[in-house]
């Protein structure tokens, strides 16, 4: 073996080991060699250790994104409901408080005086209140609805093959995601709408739906969190389905307690008018009755006198 071959081999080995030390599930992770360890910067000088063999907990991801947004690096946004009580993340991103295992703390304040309670997906499920707000426990999201719209395709999409294709794509891209959790897939070809219901039994605290949903949301919004920067594009028969947008609904084990604050002014005005009309009607009825009774009493009295 001559010197050149040796140098080439050494360079190759170095290159290979450098390449192997990267974080598959988090493109912003910083990794160090020997042994390969990856971290995510979540605040100035705060590095969160990552397990890159798994999907990174959403709480850590949001923290990292928030930090990047603060630093002006780069970063998110998000519209039927599976149930009346389903939540949509309208608040957008905040700087979450995470447990050491990556779960969300039940109470979140975004470093302000205003706090609220979140579900296991970190989505707000109560009204905002001051710091004294109590959140007894983290309420689990057991059902996630992914509402996907795909881009126009050259040929027709085979609806019969859709569920298997979507389930397979989810399983492959999101860390071997349990196929049994993909409960139902509905398809509206005219609207190009695919509705995927992902559910686990109530009470299950082992499986998690929300990390997968977050990675998919980012993939569809063309901001993949994975190092590979691929897209979520299931192949159905011979058609590759590229996604145009996504809306995620969260259903919790307990109904959220967000009040009707978000009712529009118009609806509130209609409710007020109806209530006023009912009260006015009742008052009119009441006085009419009273007058009738008085008249009745008077005639009765006169009749008695005649006798
Ligand atoms: C959290 O705080 C940041 C500013 O630090 C703000 O931009 C963001 O809208 C807040 N998020 C929520 C949900 O209140």
Image (spheres, rainbow, N blue to C red):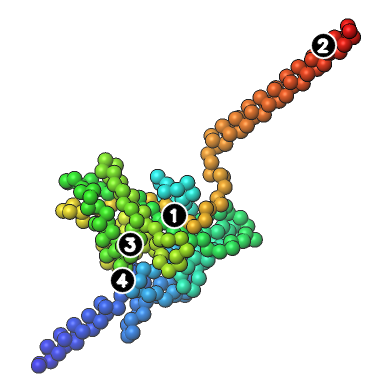
Q: Earlier in the sequence, mark 2 or mark 3?
A: 3
Mark positioned earlier in the residue sequence (1 or 2): 1
Q: State the SS at label 4.
A: loop
Q: Indicate which disc, 4 or 1, sits on the residue closer to the N terminus.
A: 4
Is residue 95 toward the left or the right of residue 77 in the image?
right
Q: Can you identify the residue that label 2 sits on?
A: 299
Q: x and y percent of residue 295 in the render?
A: 79, 14
Q: Is residue 256 left or right of 54 when viewed as pictured? A: right
- State if disc 2 and disc 1 touch (CB < 8 Å): no
Above or below, 166 relative to 193: below
Residue placed under numbered mark 1 in the picture: 250
Distance of mark 4 from mark 3, alpha carbons? Answer: 24 Å
Mark 2: which secondary structure?
Answer: helix
The residue beneath circle 3 is 180
Q: Residues within 10 Å of mark 4 (few under 14, many from 20)?
A: some
Real-space Cα distance between discs 4 and 1? 26 Å
Are the two marked residues, 4 and 3, in contact with CB atoms closer than 8 angstroms? Answer: no
Q: Residue at x 56, y 64 (%)?
A: 137
Q: How dense is the environment of label 1, judged by Cα within 10 Å: few (below 14), some, or many (20 and up)?
A: many
Relative to residue 173, is residue 75 drawn left or right? right
Mark 3 or 1: in front is 3
Q: Callout 2: 10 Å neighbours few (<14), some, many (20+)?
A: few
Residue mark closest to the camera, 4 vs 1: 1
What residue lies at 33% left-to-right and 84% top-to-bottom?
35
């Amino acid at each position: 073996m001559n010197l050149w071959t040796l140098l080439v081999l050494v360079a190759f080995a170095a290159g290979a080991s450098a390449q192997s030390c990267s974080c598959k599930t988090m493109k912003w992770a910083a990794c160090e060699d020997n042994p390969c360890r990856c971290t995510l910067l979540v605040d100035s000088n705060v590095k969160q250790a990552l397990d890159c063999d798994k999907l990174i907990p959403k709480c850590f991801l949001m923290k990292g994104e928030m930090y990047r947004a603060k630093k002006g690096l780069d970063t998110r946004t998000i519209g039927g409901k599976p149930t009346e009580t389903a939540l949509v993340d309208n608040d957008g991103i905040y700087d979450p408080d995470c447990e050491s295992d990556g779960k969300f703390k039940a109470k979140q304040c975004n470093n302000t005086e205003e706090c609220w309670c979140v579900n296991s997906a970190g989505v707000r499920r109560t009204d905002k209140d001051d710091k004294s707000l109590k959140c007894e426990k983290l309420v689990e999201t057991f059902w996630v609805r992914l509402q996907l719209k795909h881009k126009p395709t050259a040929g027709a999409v085979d609806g019969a093959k859709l569920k298997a294709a979507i389930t397979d794509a989810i399983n492959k891209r999101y860390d071997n995601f349990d196929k049994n959790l993909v409960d139902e897939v509905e398809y509206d070809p005219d609207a190009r709408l695919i509705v995927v219901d992902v559910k686990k039994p109530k009470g299950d605290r082992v499986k998690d739906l929300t990390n997968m949903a977050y990675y998919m949301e980012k993939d569809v919004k063309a901001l993949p969190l994975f190092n590979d920067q691929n897209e979520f594009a299931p192949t159905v028969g011979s058609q590759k389905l590229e996604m145009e947008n996504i809306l995620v609904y969260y259903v919790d084990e307990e109904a959220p307690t967000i009040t009707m604050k978000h009712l529009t002014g118009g609806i509130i005005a209609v409710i007020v008018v109806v209530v006023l009309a009912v009260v006015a009607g009742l008052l009119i009825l009441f006085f009419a009755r009273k007058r009738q009774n008085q008249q009745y009493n008077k005639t009765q009295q006169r009749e008695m006198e005649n006798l």
